[in-house]
Amino acid sequence: MAVVALHSAATGLNALNTRLDVIANNLANVNTTGFKASRANFQDLIYQEKAMPGVENANSDQRPTGLYVGLGVKTSGTQVRFDEGAPLTTGNDLDLMITGRGFFQVQVENTVGIGGAAYTRAGNFAVNSDGEIVLANDNGRRLEPGITVSSDADHVQITSTGEVWESIPGQAATQIGTIELASFINPAGLKQVGENLFVETDASGPPITGQPNQDGIGGLLQGYLEGSNVDPTFELIHLIRTQRAFEMNSNVIRAADETLRSVAQLRR
């Protein structure tokens, strides 16, 4: 009866509402440094089996097809796209972009990430009052391994392999540390915790750390930032498709409701 259609359409509205939320978040972060867009994946629900295929009928012939009625759809998960964003030129010494695979490592609370570590593609760094290199956001997460810049340094040079050199007037350039990057077998399994940060999960596997430009890890580009990989045109197309699908499921609910109303009026 129309009750099944009513419930199926309701699951469609719920799944499409989730997709709409994901699209809205992508568009809201179209200018967020290092942001990675997500997509909502759907899967169909279980089916009512009213007739099995292959069953013999009265003429001893096999039924070529079955009779199944699906019970709707659900959101199976959200999947992050880790394709590289466009390079944005800044010219700042502490703005870094990863060209290829890898994440910067920063310190977080142990309650946030395993071992107090989180990972990000955002390379907008600055120095705090102690000269430590930190993310230039509201919490100022420290780069890991930690690197401290002298207060009298007038220039910082970072090579593509992660070596950090500082220049002090009247002195030769000195190496003060090396930036290490981390990669994961399954980056899509990382957990998103906000602040452009990801943390390790069982699905992502443990981090594989190393020096940039070695063992398949990407290199560093100083004076650039990685832009968001959100494609506004792509998102707007999916927004329109989501709106139309929402309208169609709403029409199914309306039609099912009218059918049930007609059945109820048969008693009168």
Image: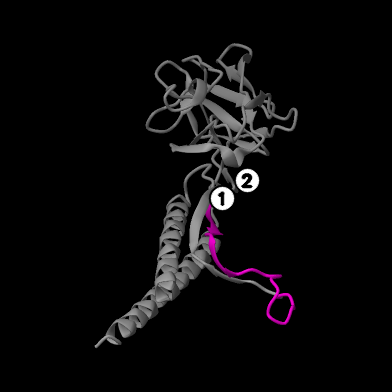
Judging depth in this view, the residue of 129 and 239 nearest the camera is 239
Segment colored magenta: 37-63
Q: State which quarter of the image contains the N terminus.
A: bottom left
Residue that carries the numbered disc 1 in the rendered image: 229
| Residue appearing at x 60%, y 16% in the figure | 177
- Is 103 magenta? The answer is no
Q: Label 2 belongs to which residue?
A: 84
**Splitting the image into 4 quarters, where does residue 225 fall?**
top right
Residue situated in front as seen by the camera: 46 or 14? 46
The quadrant of the picture occupied by the C terminus is: bottom left
Question: In the rendered structure, are the residues bearing label 1 and label 2 in contact, judged by CB atoms less than 8 Å apart?
Answer: yes
In the image, residue 242 sits, relative to residue 59, either above or below, namely above
Does the magenta-highlighted stretch encompass residue 41? yes
Residue 224 rendering spot, x and y as whole percentages: 58, 39
Residue type indicated by callout 1: Asn
Residue occupying the far top of the picture: 171
Q: Residues within 10 Å of mark 1 (few under 14, many from 20)?
A: many
The disc placed on residue 34 is none
Q: Is residue 169 placed above or below 99 in the rendered structure?
A: above
Q: How many marks?
A: 2
As helix, strand or loop, the secondary structure at mark 2 comes to: loop
Please report whichever mark, 1 or 2, sits nearer to the chain's N-terminal start: 2
Q: Give the residue at x 29% y 81%.
A: 264
x 63%, y 36%: residue: 98
